[in-house]
Every structure is written in C-alpha cells, then in structure tokens.
Amino acid sequence: CRPGGYLEGQVHVVGGDHAVDIEYVAVGLVTRVEVESGDSEYDTTQEFHRQRLTGSFRLNPGGRHDVPFRFDVPWETPITELYGQHLHGMTMGLRTELEVARAVDKSDLDAVVVHPLPAQERILDALLRLGFRFSRADVERGRVYGAQQQLPFYQEIEFYPAPHYAGRINEVEVTFVADPSGVEVILEFDKRGGFLAP
C-alpha cells in the first residue's frame, strides 16, 4: 500500500470442535516506535489506526466465516520499502483481532509493505543521486516542530553524507508529514563540530 491509500484483504475465521460466539473481528495497523523517557530509550509496539470489521456472530464447529475488508491507510503512515528494498529498522504490520465471548481472544499479525508516495520517492531519489547513502529508518514518538501532524509519532529516514559533504555533515535525517493536499519535508543535518564543539 501507500500512505493515503488502502489495504484490501480477507480475514478467514475457522471454527474448532465446538460452537463459539464471536464478539467482533477488527484490524489495526501497528509499528515499532522508539520512546525517549528521561535518560533511557525503549521500543514499544503501537497501534495507530483501527477498524472494526464485524459485529457479533456465532461460529459453528468446523464452520468458516470470511470477512472481506478495505482498510484506509493514514497519510502519515511510515514507509517501509524503497525500490523493492526493505528500509532497515522498519517494522509494520496489520494486526487482526478476534474477540471470543467467554474465551481467550485471538490475534494474528501480518507484515505490511508501505511504498512511498511519488513526491516522497522523488525526494529520496534526489538524495541518492546526490551521493547520500541510506543508513536506517526508525519511528519516534513525539511531534515535529511546526508540522501539522495527526499521528503521535514521526518517521526519520537517515542517510550517510555524500562524499563531498562528509567533512562537514555526519548524517541527514528526512521526515515526511503527508496529508491529502501535500507533503511537508523536514530535513535535519547533523553537522560535525570543531574541537570541543558539538
């Protein structure tokens, strides 16, 4: 899928050896998010978009219930792949949740590939053509200063500097904040300092 697009699929629910009452079936997009807390940092899995697919229904022994869905993907969804290559550091999945009355709830996680929007791809392509090399990508909890952001996190795509910038720049981080009318692009340059300078 792409940010602002949709995921289509089917959830297949298969009954066991006795009838059960299913409260609902839902799907949600999840990603790994870095959280800075004081002096420490940890990763957490965060669901950031959810859709309930069914109400309650009875599943008979050995019965089968197929639930087709079309799931809107938020515009700010982090990208996970560029030119068929997985962006190192990125994890994205579609969690399927089945709530069973008077029983243990079930869930399943399927990997999701998110391709860049054409505007995002052009910018990343320009950096690569200038000689910058992809380093890694991650998702950080928080807000981007000055951006009209909807989700509680943002993605940073990190690049090593092109050879002719290597003496002055340690790395470049790119963040995209997309919406239906456009894409904000935030570039952060990590500069090399002089003696005793950050």
Image (cartoon, grey):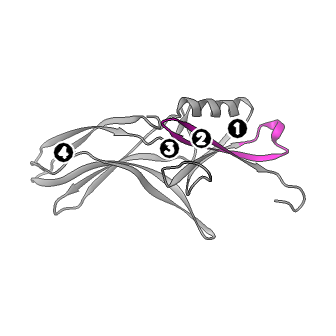
Q: In whole angstroms, how far apart are the C-alphas of marks 1 and 2? A: 22 Å
Residue extending furthest toward the bottom? 38
Question: Looking at the picture, does residue 30 appear above or below residue 2?
Answer: below
Closer mark to the observer between disc 1 and disc 4: 1
Tell me: 15 left or right of 53: left
* Mark identifier at residue 14: 4
Mark 3 vs 2, N-terminal side: 3
User: Is 164 included in the stretch rendered in magenta?
Assistant: yes
Q: Nearer the viewer, residue 178 or 101?
A: 178
* Mark identifier at residue 133: 1
Tell me: 136 left or right of 21: right
Question: Looking at the picture, does residue 60 appear above or below residue 44?
Answer: above
Task: Point out the stretch of residues depicted in magenta.
Answer: 160-187
Mark 3 vs 1, N-terminal side: 3
Callout 1: SS: strand
Q: Nearer the viewer, residue 70 or 144?
A: 144
Q: In whole angstroms, how far apart are the C-alphas of marks 1 and 4? A: 47 Å
* Mark identifier at residue 76: 3
Closer mark to the observer between disc 3 and disc 2: 2
- Within 10 Å of disc 1 (Cα), the crowding (few <14, some 14-19, many 20+) is some
- Within 10 Å of disc 2 (Cα), the crowding (few <14, some 14-19, many 20+) is some
Callout 4: SS: strand
Q: Quadrant of residue 160?
A: top right
Quarter that holds the N terminus: top left
Kind of residue indicated by mark 4: Val
Mark 3 vs 4, N-terminal side: 4
* Mark identifier at residue 184: 2
Whole-percent x, y for residue 185 in the image: 62, 41
Whole-percent x, y for residue 70 in the image: 31, 36
